[in-house]
Amino acid sequence: MKKILSALLAAGLIVSCFGGCNSDRYASLPDEYVAGTDYPTSFVPRYNKFPIAPGEGGYYFTMGDFLFFMDGESKEIAPVCSKPDCRHENESDASLAWQCNAYTGTFSFKFLQLYEENLYCLSAANQNEEGKLQISESSSLLKVSPDGTTHEILCPMPLNLEFIAIHRGYLYYAYMANETTCTLARKKMDALDEEAEIVFTLSDAYWGYFFPNGWHIYFFASSSDDSLSTAYDYDLRTQNIEKLFDKQIIEGIVDGKLLCRDQSFNIGTESETAFTLYDTKTRESTPLCSVSVEPEYSWPEYATDGKLIYQFLSPRGYPESEEYNRDDGRRVMMVYDMTGKRLMSTDLQNLPAPISLAPGDEKYGFFWYEKVYEEGAPLCLDLLKKGEEFKTETIFRRSYAGLRPDLLG
Ligand SMILES: [Zn+2]
């Protein structure tokens, strides 16, 4: 009995320290990605914020208003809710559906991360005085246990969010404080009710992407006059924010370096995109590779998982042309290795509906899309199987309305 008590006491001490000791326990972490305490940058989806997060043995994602888990081996998918009589996303009574632990509610900006044993996402759903579902304009941070046993609304978040990450003891988030003022703030995870610390503001600008890596967050912002980008290095230990370079877009992290491309890609005249690697320690840039841009396409967009470069190309004329016919041209994705060798090309066949890729890990990339032209406008999730010649497999396909109980009335 004594043994059990002391073991319980020790476990209690560990738990209480884990919850709120101090930020010193992060101090020994290396200046590179560490799973569990760090934001997984290769899961940052592009173009539409499709929320997906790697977890123990699989992946968490939201579809419509619900949180799901996919087992990494069996690919079985289940809602993150352990309530015994809950019908989860199949609940047809809107006044009950929100009581499901997997219910996150709808909010335009999407975020999902597994951080130190809990899932965090955004929700605009709350309970009103009568205990009924109420959707508000702004969002709150929501904490859900990965086994679906708890569901807790934490702090309110500002409007116009552009980025959120939980990283080494802090919640970092960027938003537009007004139409042209970029603001980056942070809060300690063990003091979310306290006022945020504003770490950076920029006037007459708009946000680009953010790449947390080790003890740094690399990000870029563009001027609202000339749209030119400036990249910054935010040192999380010193709180120093330093300008790195201009006119380059950061596409991701490769071997701890920044994968960059020239911002001045000229649609219609240039036939390739050149990439460089920027070493943040030596502040030096070296050429990496070039990838071609097929003449019938334009609007090259890129992403990386650190090993491969993903290129999206849209047919010329899209999306400005009102005459655009979705059967005329296809959106394609190409995959390249870091020498610029093309490994695959796939027809995405889904214009102009929203599509989003999370580059993912060594095993899978993830495509999220809406089949807006099909009955029920299903929401779909495809795996991009990197070890199987980049074959794709649809693992989730459900009607949009069925995943949105707030629409049931
Ligand atoms: Zn449920």
Image (spheres, rainbow, N blue to C red):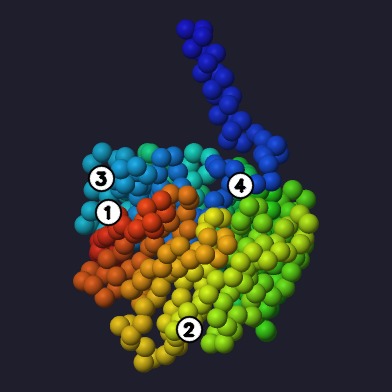
Residue at the location (44% across, 88% down)? 317
The amino acid type found where label 2 is placed reads Pro
Q: In whole angstroms, how far apart are the C-alphas of marks 3 and 4?
A: 37 Å
Q: Residue at x 26, y 38 (%)?
A: 84
Is the residue indicated by label 1 positioned so its CB lies within 8 Å of ligand 1? yes
Q: Quadrant of residue 376?
A: bottom left
Closest to the camera, between mark 2 and mark 3, is 2
Q: Are marks 3 and 4 in contact (CB under 8 Å)?
A: no
> Which label's residue is closer to the chain start, 2 or 1?
1
Q: How far apart are the two marked residues, 1 and 4, measured between alpha carbons? A: 34 Å
Which element carries disc 2, helix, strand or loop? Answer: loop
Relative to 190, does residue 47 appear above or below in the rendering? Answer: below
The residue indicated by pointer 2 is 295
Q: Residue furthest bottom?
A: 323
Nearer the viewer's eye, disc 2 or disc 1? 2
Sort mark 2 into few (<14), some (14-19) or many (20+) by Cα contacts within 10 Å.
some
**Other-residue count near label 4 (Cα within 10 Å), few / some / many at <14 / 14–19 / ≥20:** some
**Residue ID for mark 4:** 33
Give the mark nearer the N terminus: 4 vs 2.
4
Q: Would residue 273 appear left or right of 84 to someone viewing this image?
A: right
Residue carrying label 3: 86
Comparing 376 with 213, the one in front is 213
| Spatial separation of the CA atoms under disc 2 and disc 3 | 53 Å
Q: Which three-letter amino acid code belongs to the residue tagged 1?
A: Glu
Helix, strand or loop at label 1? It is helix
Amino acid type, label 4: Tyr
